[in-house]
Image: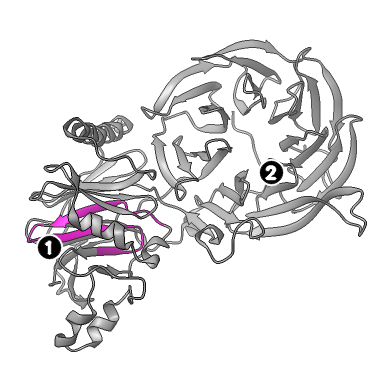
Amino acid sequence: MGEFKVHRVRFFDYMPSAIRAMAFNSRTERLALSRADGALEVFNFADSYFQEKVIPGQDGRAVEALCWVRGRLFSAGLNGEITEYDLENLRPKYTMEAYGGPVWTICSNSQGTHLAIGCEDGTVKIFEVLEETIRFQRNLDRQKGRIISLSWHPSGALIAAGMMDMIKVFNAESGHATHRLLVERGVGASKSREVVVWSVAFLSDHTIISGDSAGKVQVWDGVTGTLVRTHLVTKWDVLALSVSRDESSLLAGTSEGTVVQFQFISSTVDQHDKEWVRTRTFKNHTHDVRALAHTDTAVVSGGMDTQLVVRPLLEKVEKNTQESALRKIAFPHRSLVSCGKKAGMLLFQFHGHLELWRLGESDGHGEEKHTCTLSETHGGCQRWQAVFSNHSNNCRFLIAVCFLYLCVHVQLHCTVPVYSSCPTAMAIHPTTSNLVMVHADQQIFEYSLVQKEYTEWSRKLQKQGLHHLWLARDTPITHLTFNPRNPAHIIMHDTYMFCIIDQNLPLPDQKTLFYNQMTLRSLPEPERTSHSHSFKICKTFQHLLCVSLLEDHSLVVVERPLLDIASQLPAPVRQKKFAT
């Protein structure tokens, strides 16, 4: 394969932003989440959990809550606005002032005809969902305190509202409150300390379930307005609740970083008198779990530690399969680094600004490692421009438009056959004009733009099939490029490995030792050829962000510094304060 001089760049200290809210659309299997920097992300759970859309955040527009209405996505925030998003052009479609102060929560009825929002001024506002917009319809009876959480009854006739020290049940048609459920402060709690009802869930049998700042999950009879059961699950806050579609399972996220599962089961042998029973506790986060989604097969959680965690419910999936594997998604499924091959420059994309660096010579002597000559470049890199402007979100959007234009240009020349999985990386070979595409399900295709058909190598690859260990990877390829000195070399990488595919070598079959680089190094030179195959993989990286070849044949490898994300976060907040 030859040796490369490697510029190993380890100072792109990209830090993901905390997850604030999420909403799951079970019909389309899309999960939308918002982050503390105002950005929105949409993941396709039916396509290997791929992050297929990102809408950049805007200053002063932190999203507090999200809601799907059929295939339309809405958000609400403490700036007092409601926003619907254009998911095709990846931008806000329109924004509407709610005129109730900061908006803490938003939800829709199961019929998809109305939205309800909870406001700082104590009002629950109802909006009618029209074909192209929403229209204010009415206020429910105004309350003395802010509305923190909402949940519609599946019939659409009633709405439960979580407040300070209480839950109110409203008739959605008349707007009047029908019940007031007082939430106790808990044993030993100060009388002056209010209890915040962070989340409520209104079930079809009129059961209301609440999670509060006193660490309780409480079960209420929504018909009589009486407390049925109290579960103390934490010393701190229960911040989020999520119920399964069949209403047999409930999740509660806490400020201790745990997710507690409850199931509606019988505690007796005769299977009568079902009740909500605490069954499992999951610990996958270091800080507050701010958002939850309960899919048919998994627990999905996110919060302050920035990670989106998908934990399969093992009784719902086949064991020892990809579906049964725990997934932690911390970094974007797109390239955050662009490399200027001729100029030897790197463009880093952060949340609110761009940085441009020039590669220079290292003062070090380099280090031999994995047949590559490595040389650190931090000391030899020259910072070219620190920050473009406060309008960097616009710059980021322009970069995305350029990529989309490239795709449109190819479509005008010819139509590439449709494939069911979303492409995660693509590039056109500079000499053969072949388009190489890698998809979320890890499949690889090579399409000749000259002949307007798949290449012979691509057909052979699809006929034989990719190695099962390649397909078992759970992180998408985010970038690919080519070796200018060897047209048969395709270079690609995900977050943890980079791979050089040599199209002149035989494809590995299912019995082949796939990760064979250490084995090859131990063999004498004459024996290596018979054990070689086309996939050359290096897995010695953490948080790999870019691999690219410069014109001088040196390899640029950009890695995020090995920092513990949790150590960069403040200590978990135990006493919540409201910001208005």
Colour logic? one colour
Location of residue 244 (image quadrant): top right
Q: Which residue is mark 2?
A: 244
Is 408 on the left-hand or right-hand side of 465?
left
Provide residue 26's location: percent of width, then percent of height.
Answer: 58, 38
Mark 2 is surrounded, within 10 Å at the Cα level, by few (under 14), some (14 to 19) or many (20 or more) other residues, namely some
Asked if one can make out residue 336 in the rendered structure from this viewpoint, the answer is no
Q: Which residue is mark 1?
A: 554
Res 85 label: none
Tell whether position 414 is magenta: no
Residue located at (53% from left, 61% from top):
325
Provide residue 342's location: percent of width, then percent of height.
Answer: 8, 50
**Amino acid at dot 2:** Ser
Q: Above or below — where is 120 with respect to 201?
A: above
Dot placed on the residue nearer the N-terminal end, 1 or 2: 2
Tell whether position 482 is magenta: yes
Location of residue 543 (image quadrant): bottom left
Which region of the structure is painted magenta? 475-499
The quadrant in which the N terminus is found is: bottom left
Residue located at (68% from left, 45% from top):
575
Q: Contact, CB < 8 Å: mark 1 with mark 2?
A: no
Mark 1 is surrounded, within 10 Å at the Cα level, by few (under 14), some (14 to 19) or many (20 or more) other residues, namely some
Residue 275 or residue 111, whichever sits in front: 111
Provide residue 318's location: percent of width, then percent of height.
Answer: 59, 61
Q: Residue furthest bottom?
A: 524
The quadrant in which the C terminus is found is: top right
Mark 2: secondary structure: loop
